[in-house]
Image: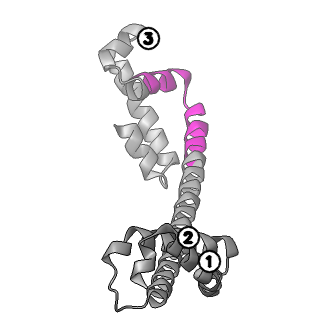
Amino acid sequence: MKQELLDNRGFEELFGLHFNNLAGFVYNYVRDEEVAKDIVHDVFLTLWKNRKHLNPVYPVKSYLFTLAQNSALNYLRHLRVIEVNERMVGELLESAAEELDDYEKRLERLEEKLALLSEKQREALVKCVVDGKKYKEVAEEMNISLNTVKTHITRALKFLRDELQDDLVLLFILGK
């Protein structure tokens, strides 16, 4: 049968003879008619590309069904990998959403506590911690002494530590 694979006409006859049976065979694995047809088309393409290397003793029909079965099983393994990846991505997105929600709640709590600070304490703290300015720069900008800036920051941080005991992460951020 190998000789008939070497020309187009013989290959077309082989295709017509086995396509429907192979598609039904593959359908039993994948349970999707279009996917089964695509797999069978790929099987015939593989057969065509490798036609010169086929063992003439091995029946072409057996080769086709073996190739179709392997292709169907590979497709199913691929679907399982996709399913696992989608589940993992879903879990990661859910976890990230929970973390973001938790972070937003903590940030909101921090903003509430910052609002309770005196205006000068909050201004000094924001300029030093958020803006990253040196105490000396802040003292000049606020037109107060360096020691007063230090006092404002010390009192603000002590107040926030007392109020936000549970949120050590926020205090760590403030401490930087």
**Label 2's element?**
helix
Q: In the structure shown, which secondary structural element does the residue marked by tag 3 occupy?
A: helix
Residue at (48, 78) in percent of width and height: 71
Task: Report the amino acid beneath label 1.
Answer: Gly
N-terminal label among 1 and 2:
1
Q: Quadrant of the C terminus?
A: top left
Secondary structure under the numbered disc 1 in the rendered image: helix
Q: Which mark is residue 41?
A: 2
Residue 120 place in picture, x, y as percent: 50, 20
Name the front one of labels 2 and 3. Answer: 2
**Is the residue marked by circle 2 packed among few (<14), some (14-19), or many (20+) residues within 10 Å?**
some
Question: Identity of the amino acid at label 3?
Answer: Met
Name the image quarter holding the N terminus. bottom left
Does residue 142 belong to the magenta stretch?
Answer: no
> Which residue is rendered at x = 41% and y = 23% of the image?
131
Q: Earlier in the sequence, mark 2 or mark 3?
A: 2
Near mark 1 (Cα within 10 A), the count class, few <14, some 14-19 or many ≥20, is few
Find disc 1 in the rendering and name its residue.
Answer: 16
Residue at image coords 37%, 91%: 58
Q: Quadrant of residue 152?
A: top left
- Marks 1 and 2 sit apart, C-alpha to C-alpha, by 12 Å
Residue that badge 3 annotates: 142
Residue 84 visible at all: no
Which is nearer the eye, 78 or 138?
78
- Looking at the image, residue 36 lies above or below residue 171: below
For the point 54% across and 49% down, the residue is: 103
Q: Using a 10 Å C-alpha cutoff, classify the residue at mark 3 as few (fewer than 14 neighbours), some (14 to 19) or many (20 or more).
A: some
Magenta highlight range? 106-127
Q: Are marks 3 and 1 in contact (CB under 8 Å)?
A: no
